[in-house]
Structures are given as C-alpha cells and as structure tokens.
Image: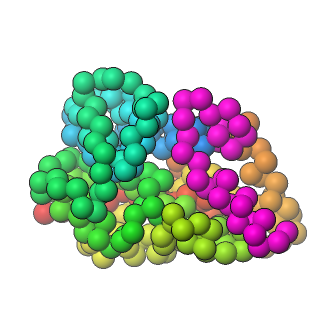
Amino acid sequence: MGKELKRRLARAIIIDRATSRSASFIGRVARERSRENYRFASAFVAGKTILDVGGGVGIGHDLLLAGGAVSIVSLDRHIAATAEGSDPRVQPVVGDFLIYPFADESFDVIICLGTLFYLGDSDGALRKMRRLLRPGGMLIINCINQDMVRRYFGMKLEDVDEKFTTAYDEHGLRALIQRHFETEPALYVQQPVPDSRTLFGAIAFWLIPLTWPLRRHPVVPKPPGAKGMFNYAIANRKN
C-alpha cells in the first residue's frame, strides 16, 4: 500500500468525531469507543465537578451524569449544532483549552479523551490541567498509541494530518504525566491487539481490527502480551 493511500486511510480512521448518527463502519466503531471512554470515566465522577476537554457533541455526558457528576463544563473549539442533550448541569463552552481563562483549582475531575493529540502543546496542556484541578483532583486522559500508528500506517501520527500534534506510546504518556503530576499514573488500554511478533501474532494483529464493529470496546487493564490502540492514564493532583 502506498504512503499516500495509508495516510488517507489513517485520516479516515483517526479523524472520527463520532456522532449520534454514526452509520458507517468507522463511525460505528468511533461511537462505541467514545461511549466506552465515558463509561470508564463515569466510575470516578460521583459528587464531582467536571471539565471535559474536547467534549465535542457530548456523546457520553449522559453517562457522567448517571454516574453522579454534579456539573460538566464541556470545552471544545467547535460545539456542533448536533450536540446531544440539554441538561442544565452541562455547560457547553467554545474555546481553545490552552488559552481559555478558567480560574485555578476550579474542577474536581478533568477528562481529556481523544483530544490530547489535537492540542498544540502537550506539556502546556498538562501543566494547565494540574493547575485547574483542586488538590486531590483527578485527571482522566487517553492518547492514541503512537507505536500502533507506526505499525499500522508506517508513519507517526503528526505525519498523518496537519490537525495532529504529538502522540505518545505507553512509556511516553506515563513520562508526560509524571513530569507534571509527580506521581505514577494508573494505566489502562482500549482496543488491545497482540504484541507478539510470531506469525500467528502478526496475523491476529492485522485481523482483529476487522472485528471491532461487532464488539464493545471497554477500557481495561492491559492484557498480558498485548498493546492498546489507545492508552489511558489516571493521575491525582497531590497538593
């Protein structure tokens, strides 16, 4: 497969802003993955005030509210006309996270799902997230696995499209969080694929994504011998 064809395929798969009417093969996977993102996050939000960085159309806000979230500020550069729901506990805000003037220590939980690699300055973003969290507050963040992007598409994420900035593998995401939160994050994965370089493992590596439209995509501890298409981390601000 030529490089430009791989780039086009990668764009179609990765730029997957899921909506309530996602009907395509890729759209269905994107919507299911997004719902599972928020289902995972909903276990940590009871009684909390939430900032959702890159909240988009609010595809999982109902899950956060069902999990007991007190309020949700959903920040996105573009709030679509198709944004889901009209619950008064959800405040949609149009803006760029890196420059939007939130007050320090405003939130109990910050959620950043499918968004880190759209932000222009990862270190600046993590620095600000820590500042916006109250002491003891929690960051729930994920990033597409740069190692998997290279293996499937033969290029780094930032070479796929100009919209993307740096993505991280598991080690890189852990190191990014440790620089700013000074703690060892808890790590999880979504859409695990075999990490084996045996013939069977290589075949499974390429075939497993074909089954994704048929399955759920829960966020789970990393299975032995596998890597996730998305890596997740949870970190708490200590003080």
- Is residue 215 left or right of 47 when viewed as pictured? right
Q: Position of residue 109 (x, y in %)?
A: 26, 48
Query: How far from the left and from the top, in percent, is residue 70?
Result: 22, 32
Front residue of this view, candidates 236 and 19: 19
Residue at the spot 42% in from the left edge and 42% down from the top edge:
56
Q: Specify the segment rendered in magenta.
A: 1-29
Q: Residue at x 24, y 61 (%)?
A: 99
**Direction from residue 79 to residue 117 in the image, left or right:** right
Residue 24 image position (x, y, % from top left): 71, 37
> Which x, y percent locates residue 156?
61, 74
Is residue 18 part of the magenta span, yes or no? yes
**Foreground residue among 29 and 139:** 29
Q: Is 42 drawn above or below residue 102 in the view shown?
A: above
Q: Quadrant of the C terminus?
A: bottom left
- Note whether 220 is above or below 194 in the view shown: above
* In magenta stretch: residue 215: no
Tell me if residue 223 can be seen: no
